[in-house]
Amino acid sequence: MDKIELSHGFGGSQTGELINKLIFEILYSEKDHFNGNDGAVLSAGERVALSTDSFVVSPLFFGEKSIGHLCVAGSVNDVLTCGAVPKYLTLSFIIEEGFEIESLKKILSDIKEECQKNSVRIVTGDTKVVPQGLCDGIYINTACLGEIKKIFSPKNIKPGDKILLSGTIGDHEAYLTILRNNLPFKSHIESDVAGLSPVLVPLLEKNFNIKAMRDPTRGGLATTLNELSSQCGYDFVVEDRKIPINDEVKAFCEITGLDKYTFASEGKMIIFVDPSDEKELLFYLKSYDNNAETIGEVTAETTGRVFLKTLVGTRILPMPTSGNLPRIC
């Protein structure tokens, strides 16, 4: 690896190579206890979870959603994966000279709306303006702080645990693919960007034996499941027919030849739970989204791979080497 390529930002195996073989090796030692997850559990008087993220999506506005909704939702969801209630958000802007004030007002309104939906407060931030041509309109950096209620971690995953998905896969990336490429695809596909606090915070007060959570963003379901399998050490088996996907997204992938399992979602969660709580948890999730489904389970095999069961047999669901679109978040 001599130079950074676009494929290093897609969320597949090349992203993992960049992070694990370059960034982690230089910045972290064993004593740092860095877990490689989207959020970090800290001890700072009270136990807290912290996430950080940068948002460079193109286009900035996509249907009813925008980079404003996305920057809040993405940060909130990362904290939720730790078993924490998101509470505070930092917000920093890098804005290109000449950016329209009306566009900035719309983004700010969308940020406020998503914060209110997820009960988080913006507590500090920063703004920089750079000369024209040095930034694609606006970039946003966030950090989200939350209060730990339960400890979710891939290390908690055990054989027999059930794998649940809170809704359909791929909506966000399918919509951006159509929009960005101006494809003549008439459909009802929309981005699923949403902070999941209203759905998941009540779960933290319940007695469900949840082991881990992860949102299938860059690299989609395939990347996320492979990352979790590698981190916990056990194999997963998921069933194709049980994985919820909108008919329009499925048709779009079939027409274009793109892999639906690598398409990003920005408002869904993969949840690993003890089998004794599967049915009750699924019933709860369906009360928010009837597309929620149990898609598979953890096996006792320890090859760290993901298997997809289809109507014609079972195959490996690999980690993608690259993605379909850069800059989806």
Image: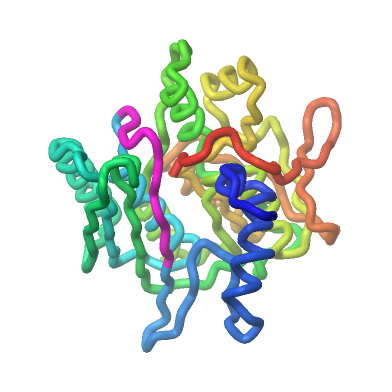
Where residue 248 appears, x then y in whole percent?
52, 19
Where residue 153 sits, quadrant-wise, is bottom right
Q: Say if the magenta span includes residue 221.
A: no
**Residue lying at 49% horizontally and 61% vertically, measured from the top left:** 81
Can the viewer see residue 67 in this picture?
yes
Viewer-closest of 60 and 50: 60
Q: How is the image coloured?
A: rainbow
Left or right: 325 as drawn, with respect to 46: right
Where residue 301 sits, quadrant-wise, is bottom right
**Residue lying at 69% horizontally and 30% vertically, measured from the top left:** 241
Where residue 253 appears, x then y in whole percent?
60, 22
Viewer-closest of 75 and 55: 55
Where residue 299 appears, x then y in whole percent?
80, 55
Q: What is the number of callouts on the image?
A: 0
**Residue lying at 28% horizontally and 67% vertically, measured from the top left:** 88
For the C terminus, the quadrant is top left
Where residue 24 appears, x then y in whole percent?
61, 70
Can the viewer see residue 219 in this picture?
no
Left or right: 146 as drawn, with respect to 68: right
Viewer-closest of 101 and 314: 101
Please tell me whether residue 207 is drawn above or below residue 65 in the rendered image: below
Left or right: 32 as drawn, with respect to 199: right
**Residue lying at 79% horizontally and 52% vertically, measured from the top left:** 305
Please tell me whether residue 297 is drawn above or below residue 323 in the rendered image: below
For the N terminus, the quadrant is bottom right
Q: Which residues are magenta?
A: 51-63
